[in-house]
Structures are given as C-alpha cells and as structure tokens.
Amino acid sequence: MSLSFYDPYLKALEAELKEVFAPREGFLYDVLRYHMGWIDQQGAAEDTPLPFHFQSVLALLTCEALSGDFHAALPSAAGIELVLNFVAVHSDVQSARLQAAVRPSVWWIWGPAQAINAGDGLHALGRTTIMRLAQRDVPADRVLRAVASLDRACLTMCEGQYMDLEFQDQLMVTSHAYYDMIRRKTAALAECSAELGAIAAGGDDGVCEAFREIGATLAMAWQINQDVADLWGQHGDGMTPSNVLDKKKSLPLIHALENAPVSSKRALGNIYMKRVLQPEDVAQIITILDESGSRQFSLDKARELAQQAIERLDGSGLAQERLTPLRLLCQQELDGGTHG
C-alpha cells in the first residue's frame, strides 16, 4: 500500500494542527513548532510533511466509514496527533535519543528539563484540541465524552509504558504479560482514536465499542510487526536504531524464552545478565531467535490480529467502499507492516 493514498487526510490534519497553533506565541510554542517540523532552530519556516501515524488517522477513517465525511473528526485526530508527539518528546529524553526522525531531538537542543516541559505542553494542547469538536457541531455531551476517553487512554498508555520499562529489569516475561502491556501502551491511543471518530460521527455505544476493538487489535498487530523490524532490521541483520541493546522484552524474545531448548534459554539468560549489552550480543540473540522460529511465530501472531480487525470491519454492516481505507491499514499489518 502506498501511503500517498492517505495524503488528503494528512493535509487536512496538518491544516487543523496549524490552526490550533496559530494564536499561540512564545518560546514554548516555537519549540513545539520545531518538533512538529514547521520551523528550524532559529525560527525560520520549514515545510516538513506531517508523518503518517495510523493512530491519529484512525479517527478520520472511522468517522468517514460511519458518516461518509471525515472532517467532523479533525479535532479528534489533531488531539491524538499532539498526544503522540508528547509521547515522542518524552521518549527521546528517556532513551537519550539524539535524533527525532530527521532532526535533532528537542532535549538535545534545549535540554531535558525544557523537553519535559514541551512534552507536557503537547499533552495539554492535545486535550484542549479535542474540545474543538464543538466547532464541528458535535453536541457538548459527546465532546465531554471524547475528552474523558482521551484522558483514560493517556493514563492506560502510561500504565503500559511503566510495564514496558519494568520488563527491562526482568529476565522472564510471559507472553500473556506482553500482550497486556502492548494492549495498554500501544493500543490505548489507537482504540481511543477510533472511538473518537465514532463519537464525531454520532455513533452509539455499540458502534463506539466495536471500533475501539478494531483500533486496539490493529495497534497490537502493528506493535508486533514493529518488534520484528526492530530486531531483524530492513536487511535481517539485527542492526537497527531500536533493538535489544536496551533489554526491551519484545514478542520474539519472549517466545524464545518460553519455547526454545534449555541450552538456548540459558544462553539468552547469560546475555541478559550482563550489565550492558554489546552489538555482538545482538547477533547471538538473533541466531537463537532464528533457530527457535520466533520471528515466524511473531509475524503469524500479527497476521492473526490483523485478520481479526478485518473480520470485525467486514461484520460491521457498513458499505465496503466506505471501509476501504480502514481495510488497507489492516491489510498492511496482515502483510507484515511497513518494514518489508
């Protein structure tokens, strides 16, 4: 699937975001505009295209599937996008990541304290942006419901992030615990986005819940495909910017720890007992995962989840032509994600 298919949604979303920022002036908002790719460090205008985040786009696609028009959900999509960027800024600080996408991280330029402040600003701005639903003729009670949904999603996401960080210090993490973690950390915003799209479209409780489940299942498939990409890389060499050097417990590793021969489990344990992992440790881990069939297991699990999302869409009773953009998102994860 070519992401250019989604250009009209992304252009409308970026216009909504820039409208949110238009009346806001001062250093904080210049830092945020820098992070969003609209200005450089000196404040000169830039035109970096808005990246494709399926979580924020889900609100637009859900609203369109239900009502035939995505524009009512633009405040919801913009709010989700701002929260995703709040997470990104804080994640850069936590991981000491020097580069955010194609430019230096906010914390690397202005320091960790200002980066945390900027991330908090993005979170607050995301929440207030949801209230712009009232300008799209969404009734006040549904606007309040949307804000409450975002608040719950952010709290659930933080629970998942806590679990993910805690897992780094544990050798044994069960697959059940992993699925619970990604349902919180990764799926919370996606299921919220889908629900917000349904709220903007006037969907009832049953419709909102159905699309929440579609969003959550799709997000879990995406995360597992991301796990595989982070470990094996574009060329299957394990050398990616985000891999096991930080001792993250992804599904392929958990599968091997649960199912590999005792000698392989012992070897993995010896590696993870080290205080700091080296690149040669990654190569050994990848070899063990390959021998244990952990990559294929993980890809199969992602496909299973993506297929569940497609089946739920097909069972929604909506016209197939309205569901096409959503089905394409699910199909991409069915095919292994964006990572080849």
Image: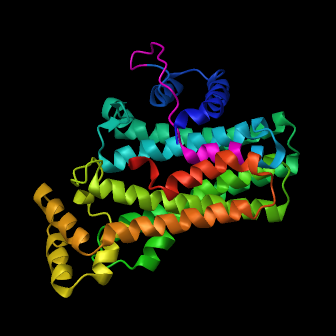
The verdict on residue 46 being magenta is yes
Residue at coordinates 48% horizontally, 72% vertically from top-left?
179
| Residue 188: x %, y % from top left | 58, 59
Farthest residue, direction top:
44
Q: Quadrant of residue 17?
A: top right
Q: Give the answer, above or below, for where 64 lies relative to 151.
A: above
| Residue 332: x %, y % from top left | 52, 51
Q: Nearer the viewer, residue 71 or 67?
A: 67
Q: Is residue 35 left or right of residue 167?
A: right
Q: Is residue 93 left or right of residue 194?
A: left
Q: Quadrant of residue 110?
A: top left
Q: Main secondary structure of the magenta part?
A: loop
Residue at coordinates 78% horizontally, 54% vertically from top-left?
145
Q: Is residue 159 visible?
A: no
Residue at coordinates 11% horizontally, 59% vertically from top-left?
280
State the extent of the magenta-drawn residues as a range.
40-62
Q: Give the answer, above or below, for where 115 lies relative to 248.
A: above
Q: Is residue 201 left or right of residue 14?
A: right
| Residue 186: x %, y % from top left | 51, 58
The verdict on residue 313 being magenta is no
| Residue 75: x %, y % from top left | 71, 38
Q: Is residue 32 visible?
A: yes
Q: Quadrant of residue 169?
A: bottom left
The number of numbered discs placed on residues in the rendered structure image is 0
